[in-house]
Image (cartoon, grey):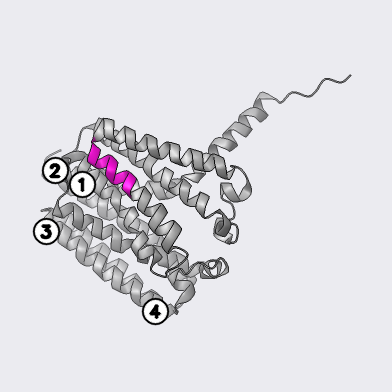
Amino acid sequence: MVAPALSSPTSVGAKLGAKVGAYVALTKPRIIELLLVTTVPTMVVAEQGVPPLWLMVATVIGGTLAAGGANAINMYVDRDIDALMERTQGRPLVTGAVSPRSALVFAISIEVLAFLFLWQVVNLLSAVLAVSACLFYVFVYTLWLKRSSSSNIVIGGAAGAVPVLVGWSAVTDSLSWSALVLFGVIFFWTPPHFWALAIKYKDDYARADVPMLPSVASHRQTTDRILAYSVVVWALTLVFGATADLGLLYWAVAIVLGGVFTGMAVELRRTESPARAIRMFTFSITYITLLFGAMAVDVIVRNGW
């Protein structure tokens, strides 16, 4: 009798790594990176200096778990349309790397962990805000608006703006007008950011019967809205500079970046070009990263840190 072949340690390790990678992919780590880029600078502004390291780390950990859980539930719900779209066909639930039941258990587990962790280590307000964002993202955006309204990302994008509120409340255990204005910056930034990407993939959304604006409206209608929202974002960044009493560094960066972002929206409106749309999408990430970085640096420099 021939003895069954044993798996080598290398193959076992590779399988384990692939499985872990699949679960990480469920959380959409690239989206989480962007959320965290907005959280830490917000904490610096709320503190008017550098908050304690443990608080920043704890808020980032809790925010990562909360956002990851929401994203994983989104993948669980959307696995049918993900299989139809070229952009999402490599996701773990489409490829079978993770079973739907395992994905749902994983998502709910880390969401509960996020709430308990933030409650016990940070504060209850931050925990409630973080989990509320998840519930809004799942029930309002994913289950209701995404498949039924071309305004899906406009309203649903509110969930992506909540991390600034979590960051602010983590420091102050309260909210303020400045925090709400900053929420507005992300809320109004999200549609032009996402619509620029959706222009390239509008056929994907049409194939999956998802009424994302570029797939159900003309290029002019879509880019008119992109331009309008970009102007509102620019205005709100200046309002935030005033309400948060930020200095010249922030004001200069906000004015220049807002001008560039709005200029790109104007150019996209003039020319129907998927390549130009992707450039705007890519810059929108750079825009928000530099803007939030500037507000943190402005506070640190002016307070002598």
Q: Residues within 10 Å of mark 3 (few under 14, many from 20)?
A: few
Horizontally, residue 225 falls left or right of residue 20, namely left
Tell me which label, 1 or 2, sits earlier in the chain.
Answer: 2
Residue 132, label in figure: none
Query: Is there a contact, CB below 8 Å, between mark 4 and mark 1?
Result: no
Among numbered discs 2 and 4, the one appearing first in the sequence: 2
Q: Where is residue 25 in the image (x, y as percent from the top left)?
A: 51, 44
Q: Was residue 129 drawn as part of the magenta stretch in this picture? A: yes
The magenta stretch is: 123-132
- Residue 258 vertical position relative to residue 104 in the rendered view, above or below: below
Q: Distance between the residues labelled 3 and 2?
A: 14 Å
Q: Where is residue 123 in the image (x, y as percent from the top left)?
A: 23, 36
Q: Name the residue under label 4.
A: 221
Quarter of the C terminus within the rendering:
top left
Residue type for callout 1 = Val
Q: Is mark 3 on a helix, strand or loop?
A: helix
Give x and y (percent) for residue 159.
34, 54
The numbered mark, 4 or 1, whose residue comes first in the sequence reads 4
Q: Quadrant of residue 302?
A: top left
**Are there few (<14), some (14-19), or many (20+) residues within 10 Å of tag 2?**
some
Q: What residue type is labelled 2?
A: Gln
